[in-house]
Amino acid sequence: MIDLKALRENPQHFIDGSKAKNVAVDIPKLVKLDEQRRALQTQQESIRAAQKKLSKETGPKIGQLMGKLKGASEADQPAIQAEIDEIKAAPAKMKDEINAFEAQITAIEPEIATIHLSIPQPADSDVPVGTSADDNVELSLWAPDGWDWDKSFEANKGFKPRTHIELCEMHDLVDYPRGVKIAGSRSYILKGDGMRLHQAILQFAFNTMINENGFTPMSVPVLVREEAMVGTGFFPGGRDQAYHINETSRGGGYDMFLTGTGEVGLMGVHQDEILDESKLPIKYVTVSTCFRREAGAAGKDTAGLYRIHQFDKVEQIVIDVADEIKSRQHHKDMMGFVEGLLKALKLPHRLLQCCTADLGAKNADMIDIECWMPGRGDTDDAGTPMGEFGETHSASRLYDYQCRRLNMRYRQGGEGGKGSTTFCHSLNNTVAASPRILIPILEMYQNADGSITVPGELVPYMNGQTTIG
């Protein structure tokens, strides 16, 4: 949620920011409605102040008039009584006027809230302007020793690659038909070493963030109230991607939603709280099951483990003071944690600077990390995949956009401080999302005979097993 004060001071900044993100939102209308609301509130407060003043003066005035009434002639009494009645009636009349203004304010509040919640955070000035993900910019490229980006997988490894779908079938790692039978399209069942490898990467990522990077492990709900989805910025824009549990129609008090990332639960922990500055930064990590409808993805990556409805993810978030320099450093650090993990796994990858059109509504900046997946992409004349990058991580910098919606603040002046309160800054980044991350692991660690070498970092989590197949 953007700061309305900042919007009033420079509406064009937010108009341009929305345009750069390809978000259609009527900001001039919000400015007009906000002016209307503030004018109504000013008039309401003016009457309320007059009412308060009148209440102090009413008693003495009526007392004076009552005394005057007793000594007045019969001809003068009606006028004095009328004045007394008018003074007595004035507070009720003012109350009706105050209520009338309140009704007008209440009538326009929903429209103000709807537009306000739909305004995206403008991208930082150093984010490249673009019209789609095609305008994202490659920042860096990394591969382990022995991998040459100028050569094909076959030229690097000495044999043609099998896709992760073929490898999973060869080693009975995934059962797609039974997954679809149970849960429909884009469903699967991990089996045997497939499930063990899935758990191994999650445990490795989770433990790395806790033991090496100082994050606090948390378990959080994945079934949440609508307020949590709105507060974290996933609603209203992402409503079509969330699974909705309609509890109100069944007599429940409120509807629920399945989260698509552990970020929702982690950020909701301190919703509506005032934190001590001395306790910041807060660094949380969770591993949770995630659910996404993949609305609008019909026909995209329908086979395999790339685009699915249910998966598990290790997610990291940071909450800190409102300092852009610190937020930018946290952003670099979080990407560094993930790059360190991918380098430990020896997975070729790249960092991709997302352009304005690919940031999403809530992000001031976002860096994607994409792993090389030999089994994706176009095929050559022999039908062999040429390989393609696939997104496995996204690191987002949000400043106070999310915390403002969550009403998450900190009090300046340290523990027990009495300084003013300020909205916190927040960031988030994927640590590992599986089974998607299994795709580059299986495909990059395959051998000529179809067996798969278990990455060294995962061997301890596989009970010493070094090979699949």
Image: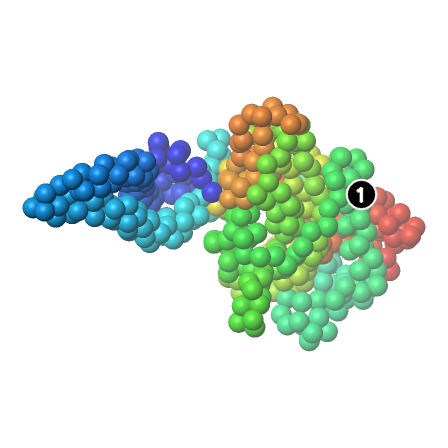
Q: Quadrant of the C terminus?
A: bottom right
Q: Residue at position x 68%, y 42% from top?
A: 316
Closest to the observer: 154 or 119? 119
| Amino acid on which disc 1 is placed | Asn
Residue 100 is situated, as x and y percent measured from the top left of the image, at 28, 51
Specify whether residue 259 is in view.
yes
Residue 94 is situated, as x and y percent measured from the top left of the image, at 27, 46
Closest to the observer: 347 or 160? 347
Q: Residue at position x 64%, y 66% from top?
A: 186
Residue 354 is situated, as x and y percent measured from the top left of the image, at 53, 41
Residue 23, above or below 251: above
92 displayed left or right of 400: left
90 displayed left or right of 247: left
Q: Which residue is mark 1?
A: 207
Q: Residue at position x 28%, y 45% from top?
A: 91
Q: Work out which residue is located at the far left of the displayed protein and give it.
A: 75
Closest to the observer: 245 or 60? 60
Residue 287 is situated, as x and y percent measured from the top left of the image, at 73, 50
Residue 112, above or below 253: above
225 displayed left or right of 342: left
Kindly state the secondary structure of the residue where label 1 is placed. Answer: helix
60 displayed left or right of 335: left
Where on the picture, by quarter, is residue 176? bottom right
Where on the picture, by quarter, is residue 302? bottom right
